[in-house]
Amino acid sequence: MAEAQAVYAPEIVAQESLLVLEHELVFARLVHRDFENEVAKYGDVVNTRKPTNLTASKWAGQATTLGAASDEITVQRPTATNVAVTLDKHVYTSFMEEDKPAAVSIKSLRDEFIMPSLVPIADYIDEACICEMITATATDGTVYAGHDYANNHITRVNSLSSTVAAEDVIALRQSLNTAKCPAEPRFLVCSTEHEAQFLADTLFVQADQSGSTEALTNARLGRKFGFDCYFDQQIPNDATTTTKAQSLAFHRGCLALVMRPLRQVPAGMGAVSVVQAYNNLAIRIVSAYNLRGMGVDIKFDCLFGVRLLDANLGRKLVG
């Protein structure tokens, strides 16, 4: 790392780190992300807005008497529910690059320390988003008909057979359609077990039936039945059964991920820091020489919070 610092400007390292972080995220890239590019600290509360739906009314036509009530349309006043997202998750990775190894060996900047540092951070953020969607309650406390959990958790849809298949994705689509969930953008994020079962379904792997050769060429599910499909290794088994796998279908507005750039380390504190933010992601890199260890201490860290916005826009498939 000492050699890398001498060759690469800290800003370039931070920019490359952001690109790696965005690439490694799966679930977190699909949810609602919105923040202003301002410095924050652990425990801060960020207020975002959850819009409400308007109601369509039928025009009754003008009345015979001028000035009658039927001459006027009903003017609605759209409001937005304030949603407080607490920045209560400060995740980091840290390591030391010793002087001697750094002096005799220079590897790829990305492979040597950016990937090993950012992959576990991305996994942590994905897992936090997944756990929030599975276990949290919606912000407005509304209880929707058909939910099988108290306190408005997202609805569970059981697999129609012993292994998940195309018919289960169709059932998820029907459930979201019935709930009047917007058609776009919708995502289906599968557990690794469910992904393997979907890939065994001919509707997903035969190009003439699926309309795409994507599953054949790179083992990814692509777009199926109105969902952009992914898999995420962080999705756990269903908590109520412990042995059954689960996958999550949702609209982007179901969950909010809020990230804020951390502050720069003040000058004269014996450390160098760089903060970069892009596409509603933010990362800080702090480095300082460790005299006792004869090397450079490096830390990558992110500050974020997650919050379920609307449980009606999410479903979990269990089977």
Image (cartoon, rainbow, N blue to C red):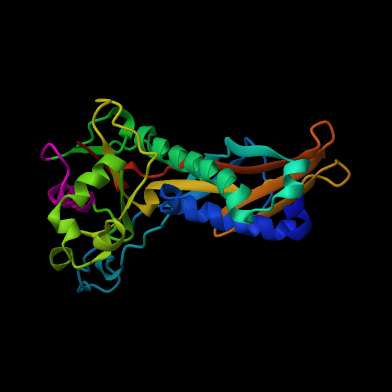
Judge whether 189 appears above or below 227 on screen.
above
Which residue is located at x 48 percent, y 51 percent? 24
Q: Is residue 233 magenta?
A: no
Residue 41 location, quadrant: top right
Counting from the top left corner in percent of width and height, residue 152 is at 31, 34
Q: In this rendered view, identify the residue nearer to me: 152 or 12.
A: 12
**Residue 1 in view here:** no
Q: In this rendered view, identify the residue nearer to me: 283 or 81.
A: 283
Q: Is residue 71 left or right of residue 37?
A: left
Q: Is residue 48 left or right of residue 273?
A: left
Which residue reaches farthest front? 104
Principal secondary structure, stretch drawn in magenta: helix
Counting from the top left corner in percent of width and height, residue 104 is at 74, 48
Counting from the top left corner in percent of width and height, residue 186 is at 31, 56
Residue 134 location, quadrant: top left
**Residue 190 in view here:** yes
What range of the chain is rendered magenta?
160-179
Locate the C terminus by quadrant: top left
Q: Is residue 124 left or right of residue 274?
A: left
